[in-house]
Each structure stands twice: as structure tokens, then as C-alpha cells.
Image (cartoon, helix red, strand yellow):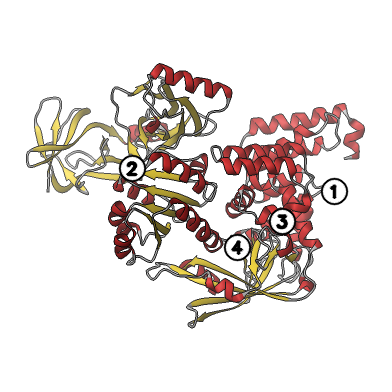
Amino acid sequence: MPSVIILDDNNDQSANITNSSFIQIYHTQSNENLFLTATVFNRTVSNSNLLFATIEMSNRSLYEIFPSISMSQTRSKRSFHYDYIVKHNGSILEQAFVSIEWRNNREQRVAQKSRMKPKVEAFNPFNEQSCVVGQHTEMSWKFSGIEKPQVTWWFSGQPLKTNSRFRVTESEDGRSTITIHKTEFVDEGIYIARAYNSVGETEAKTILYIAGIKPVIEIDLEAKLKVANRALESGMIKPVILMDDYHTNADNQHLEIFSLIWLDANPNVQELQGTQHKLCSIINQLKTFRDVEQCQNYIKGRTLKDRIVMIVSGQLGREIVPSVHKLRQVISIYVYCMDKKSNERWASKFSKVKAVVVEHDELVSRIKTDHKIQRKLEESVTINLFNTSTKVGKSTTGVNGQFVFSQVLIDCLLRLKSNQEDKTELINYCKQQYEGNSLELNNIREFEKDYVSDKVLWWYTKESFFYKTLNSALRVQDVRLIFLFRTFIVDIYRQLQNCQAKQSLQVYRSQMISSDELQTLTQCCDQFISVNSFFSTSTDKYQALTLLKIPEDAQNLEPILFEIDADPKMVTTKPFADITANSEFSGESEVLFMIGSIFCVKSIIRNNDYNVWIIKISLCSDNQHGLQEVLMNVKQKTANGETNLQTLGKILWEMGKLDLAEEYFTRRLKELPPDDSSLDNLYEDLAKLASQTCNYDKSVYWHKKSVEFRKKHPLTASVI
């Protein structure tokens, strides 16, 4: 156990710390930082005096902090300073600055009122910027707070060490700036500025992209910069595949849950580039590593919702596979090597190792085939629950509230008119997400040029940006993106209506879910669920079951098979149809259900023959679930005649998404002429919304706009 010493920086006298109760130290730990605040109760003085100390630690690798410590002697002066030192075997391990001052009760109350946790002085604490390799660049964020916050910079999850290339400066107005001299490709990534004081902490994030073209032969820096600058100016800059650095924008935005990781200490770079571009046509996110530890840390830093496909060399695979094999994020591993036979021996012990291959074409082909199955199994389906045992009445809160508003939101989007501007915005968004992915960019250009509504199901079943982006938006309920997709959602809806099944069907869907999700579903027998995405099923039960190949050591995972009875007589607004004839894959018997389809959970039974849970559900009509009255009530409150962006804004307002509500009210405002009769009502909605967010100045502004409009257009206002 290291010794702990406090040294008085005023007179160099030391005070030993013992485990008593005079000074209590409280520490809070975020993911990377350790902050300490010491509150000192000095029992040798009256209760009206308190001694307060703040200890700021810059390093998190502290051995131990005593829950309570004391000083060997007390001080009568009002303030003094200490160095906090941790020693082990005579060597200093940790050191920090300690500031202590006396306050009486009144002074403490004043101090508490005046303190304020740090905040970012920016509308959005996230931005992106880029520079050409070799150039200097700066990133800065301004923070405010009382006490004045201290700022630390982090890169790739680690504290950033300053050196001759990285310099951090602080200005009096609270702005912290990091300057990078002569940027390199390895400097690309996520930079986080963390500000903290004794009240709290906050952070701001910058994603830095390094543009450039990696030379095949050595050239001088000046020539290299000229090439890069010309490429940047022409708009023809392309991302460069580099070890430990390759990734796409989607890697940062988490548009898809799937990503590829390639670990190889000595790759063939020229061969690797061609293979990686092919792999990116399957899974857009790709990151490469040479170092096992860095790769492990990256994987362990992913969320449990992420799904990782790994490619490893034989040598490094032996090291890393045992440590990551049981992680939920890792779903499959491929060993790419020169000696297939020797690597098959160790790889056979791990069920997630799908193949040991020596040819890159075989590697790409195997990943493509397996990923088609993985996508069906691993992409989660967002489900809303409706509990009929709850006394719903006209309540739209809690679980049933989510059920209600998901239905109302879909209904609104289906009735909203489309326009070319929104389609263009969606296309530009997709181009940005798949920047550098030549295959997907070609798909996007083809879609932009040739799309017709009759081909929407062909595009939906095609393994391309359209399916991936739409499903991702629906999975995470990204309202902005779903809004941009609404034209194509309407096209799918109409195609399903045109192809609506005429007879009752029994269809199947296999899925991997967590034990917790299964437990939730088991409590929903005789209850209702709605699906927030398109629900893809198969008429072939055996085919659905064969997809469920469960790793022997799968932890907290349960294989399920939805067995769905669908009667077309139950269809009122959510159609379903066999889309095999319209699919890119005509050999598959696929039945697709509309977003928002409602099912009743009949039973959940364990089938030991197939080692799978069978969940029997049946399609319901919109008025079977007992919420028809509530749905109508919400629609009446949010809709007034024509469905438009103001309608969408009101629904989002009811859902508690106030920022989004304001965004679509403002969009509506921009599309209306200055004398439109609906402006008065829109101004009033904006005023009420601003008042609800306590932005009273803005509320008054919109009320004034309403009054001015009525004065200018009295006849129009009277009609309203």
C-alpha cells in the first residue's frame, strides 16, 4: 500500500494522514477522469466554521483514496495550499494541487449559490472539420462556469499528451485550443475537450478528418501538399486506406450497427486496399489494426448494440480471439492466413470463427454470404408494447404512450406531401454517409437517376444503401431521417396495398434477442405489440430455423422464432404482402408487413427439439387493441384539416420532442407565403412551445407576430 502524504507548500512541513474522520474526501469517476473534492470538518473549532478543500487529479491511475483522512495539526489562518502526493517505495506515483480555505455558514451559502457547473458556449457541442495532411490545424471550444472550469483534451479515449506537434492554449475568456503542427494521417479521429470544476463537468467533441493521397514512392512534402491541395480544391479528394486509421464517416455516425475490423501485423498493403474496398461494399464501416492491445480496447469500447465482424491473421488471431470471443459485440471471426492447416487446429476451438481462408476472393465471398444471414438475425426489431391491464383512458404516457404515438406518427408521415427538396436532402445525406465507398456511391447515383415508385420493393430488398439507411433510421427512430424517407415509405405502403395477400398465411421470422428482451416478451402474453419497422418474414419455417446457428458459448442470448398468423380480414391500414415477385432475390419467399403492424402475443413456448423459443403472434386490426379512442383523440388534437409540417410538429410536441417540434414548425413557416391564413395559428403554436421551454422572450416575439398578422389581415384572421 503506498503511503499518502500532504505537504504544505507554504512552509514545507508535512502532515501525516490517518484513517480518521476529520477530513472526508469524496471522489467521482467518469469513464476516463477521476475528480476529488475534499470537505474538511475541523472538530477543534465551533460548528459554524467549515474547512473546504478541492483536490484536482490529472491522472486516473490512483492506487486508493481513503474514505476519511485527518491532519496531524490544525491551522488558524483562513486559507492555505497543499501538494497532494502518493508515494510507493520512496517514489512519487501521483501528485496534485490542493487548495483549502475556511468559510463560515453564511460564506458557504453564498459560495454555493454562486457556483455553476461548466457548460459549452456553443449551440451544438459537436462539430466536424478537416485539413490536408502536413498542414497545421486548430480545434477550440469555449467553456463557462463558476468556478472557472479546467479543461483537458482527449484523443481516441486517452488523455492527449502535449509535445512538439500538439500544443494546448487557454485564453482568459474560457476558450481552450489545441493546435496540431504538420498533421499526419494518424491524427484523424475524435478529439474531446472535457471541462470540469467542483460542481460538475461537461464535454465537447470534434471529429477531425485528414485528407490526402498516400504516395506509392517517397516524394518531398511540398510536392505532396500540392497534390493534396489540388485534390481538395477540385472536390476529388478520396479517403486513403491506412493501417490503424481506415474508417468511413459512418463509423463515427453509427448509421449501421455492423462494422468490420481487420487485425494484421504485416499486411500486403496493395492487396489489402483492393480487398477492403470490396468488403466495404458489404459492410460500410471498416477499421484496421496492427496491434492486438489497441484492437482489444477498441472492441471493448463499442456498445452492446454494435455488431463486429473480425478478420485476423493467423499469428495475431491466436492472441486476440480467446479474449474477445465471448464479447456480445463480436458475431463472427475469419482467419486470413498463409498456412490454413495449422491455423484450423486452434481456430476449431472457437465457434465464432466461421472460416480459415488463404485467398482474398474467398474471404470476401464468405463474408458476403454470412453477412446476409447475420443481418436478418442480428438487426433488432424495435417493438412497442400495449398493456391492456393498464387503465389507459385518455392517457398517452408510459409504455402505452409510445405505442400510441408510434401509430400516430406513421399515420402522419403517410399523409404528408413530398417535395423534391427533401428527396435531394436525403440523397446528399446518403452520399455523405457513404463517402469513399465507390460501390454504394454508384448505387446512390443510379437511384437518384432512375428511381420510380414501382421499383421501390426491388430497392428495399437490394443489399444497398437504401435498405441499410432506411432500416437504421427506423431501428433508432431517427425522426429527421424517417421524415426524409417518407416518400419512399409511402411507395412501399402502396405496393403492399396493391399486392395485399388474399388468403390467411402462416409465416416465420428467426431472431437473436437478449435474455432480458425475452423476459419482457414472456410477460406480454395476451397483450399487443407494434413493430416500428418493416417486418420481414418467410413462408418457409425450415429456412427460418436453419438461420439460427447458436454459438455454444453465447452469453445472454436467446434464439427465437416468431410464428405469425396473418389474416387479410384484419387489415385496415397496415397491409402485408408476398413480395417475392418484386424482390431482387426472386428465389426467396418473403412476406413483408407494413411499419406499425399490430400483433397479439398468443404464447411463448420453449422447443427443445430445435433449442429455440417459439413466439406465436397473430395480426390484429387497428381497432382490436382498445386504443382506438385514444388514437382518435390524439389525431383530433394534432390534426386540423390538411396534414402538413405543423401537424407533424404538434405530434412531436405531444411526444415531448420539443426541439424537433420547433424545427418542423419553422420548416412550415418557410414554405408559407406571408399572407397565408394558417400563419396566425402557426405563430400561436410557436409562442406556446417557446413558453413551455421557458424561452419567454421568444414566446413574446411569436405572440407579437400573431397580433401583427391579425392587424394586417383582419378578414383572414376572422375566418380562422
Q: CA distance from mark 3 to mark 1?
A: 31 Å
Q: Nearer the viewer, mark 3 or mark 2?
A: 3
Residue 683 percent across, percent down from the top left? 76, 35
| Secondary structure of the residue carrying numbered label 3 | helix
Is residue 523 visible to us here?
A: no
Q: Nearer the viewer, mark 3 or mark 1?
A: 3
Would you name the residue on which mark 3 appears? 457
Q: Amino acid at mark 1?
A: Gly
Q: Position of residue 628 (x, y in %)?
A: 75, 65
**Foreground: disc 3 or disc 4:** 3
Residue highlighted by disc 1: 641
Going from the N terminus, do you reach mark 3 or mark 4 first?
Answer: 4
**Residue name at image x 87 percent, y 26 percent:** 712
Q: Earlier in the sequence, mark 1 or mark 2?
A: 2
Q: Spatial distance from mark 3 to mark 2, Cα to Cα?
A: 46 Å
Above or below: residue 454 compared with residue 200: below
Please name the residue that numbered disc 2 is placed on: 32
Q: Earlier in the sequence, mark 2 or mark 4?
A: 2
Q: Please rate how many residues cluster around mark 1, counting C-alpha atoms within 10 Å: few if below 14, some from 14 to 19, many from 20.
A: few
Mark 3 / mark 1, whichever is N-terminal: 3
Please state which amino acid type lies under the numbered disc 3: Leu
In the image, what residue type sits under mark 2? Glu
Q: Is residue 418 above or below residue 371?
A: above
- For the residue labelled by badge 4, is the local secondary structure a helix, a strand or a loop? strand
Mark 2 vs 4: CB contact within 8 A: no
Asked if residue 273 lies left or right of residue 75, the reply is: right
Q: Which residue is mark 4?
A: 383
Cβ atoms at labels 4 and 1 below 8 Å apart: no
Under mark 4, the amino acid is Ile
Q: Most extreme residue toward the bottom, as rendered?
A: 609
- Measure how far apart labels 3 and 4 are at the Cα level: 23 Å
| Lower position in the chain sequence, tag 4 or tag 1 | 4
